[in-house]
Image (cartoon, rainbow, N blue to C red):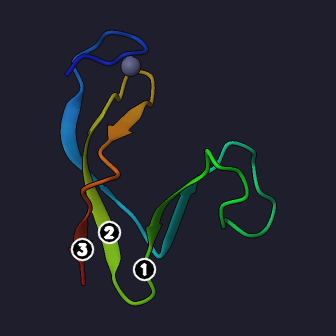
Amino acid sequence: MKCPKCGVEMNTGYLQTGNLVAFNKQRHKISLNSKDPEDVMVSRRAFTSNDFTGYICKQCGLIVFDYLNPKTRL
Ligand SMILES: [Zn+2]
């Protein structure tokens, strides 16, 4: 996959997360819980973690990943 930002070939891998990962429209200062309809709670795990297949561009720092199909990690 070519990087949509700079056009360099991206490397495949896994975005490995901790307990809580959110993508929010506005930057929340404390809680990561959704406030806006466009907010996405990407990962919420108490005792396990989620890994997401994706691509990384080491040229410009962009990461693209599939947040709908996580793989649970113990
Ligand atoms: Zn790039």
- Mark 2 or mark 1: whose residue is earlier in sequence: 1
> For mark 3, what is the residue?
72
Farthest-out residue, front: 37
**Amino acid type, label 3:** Thr
Q: Residue 70: percent from the left, percent from the top?
A: 26, 61
- Mark 3 or mark 1: whose residue is earlier in sequence: 1
Q: Residue 13: percent from the left, percent from the top?
A: 20, 46
The CA span between labels 3 and 1 is 9 Å
The CA span between labels 2 and 3 is 5 Å
Ligand 1 falls in quadrant: top left
Q: Residue 74: percent from the left, percent from the top?
A: 24, 84
- Tell me if 55 is positioned left or right of 6 in this view: left
3 and 1 marks in contact (CB < 8 Å): yes
The CA span between labels 2 and 1 is 8 Å
> For mark 2, what is the residue?
50
Position of the N terminus, as image quadrant, is top left
Q: Residue 54: percent from the left, percent from the top?
A: 25, 42
Position of residue 43 relative to residue 59, above or below, is below
Position of residue 5 relative to residue 15, above or below, is above
Position of residue 46 relative to residue 20, above or below, is below
> For mark 1, what is the residue?
45
- Mark 2 or mark 3: whose residue is earlier in sequence: 2
2 and 1 marks in contact (CB < 8 Å): yes
Task: For mark 3, give the secondary structure.
Answer: strand
2 and 3 marks in contact (CB < 8 Å): yes
- Tell me if 66 is positioned left or right of 39 in this view: left
Q: Residue at x 39, y 36 (%)?
A: 63
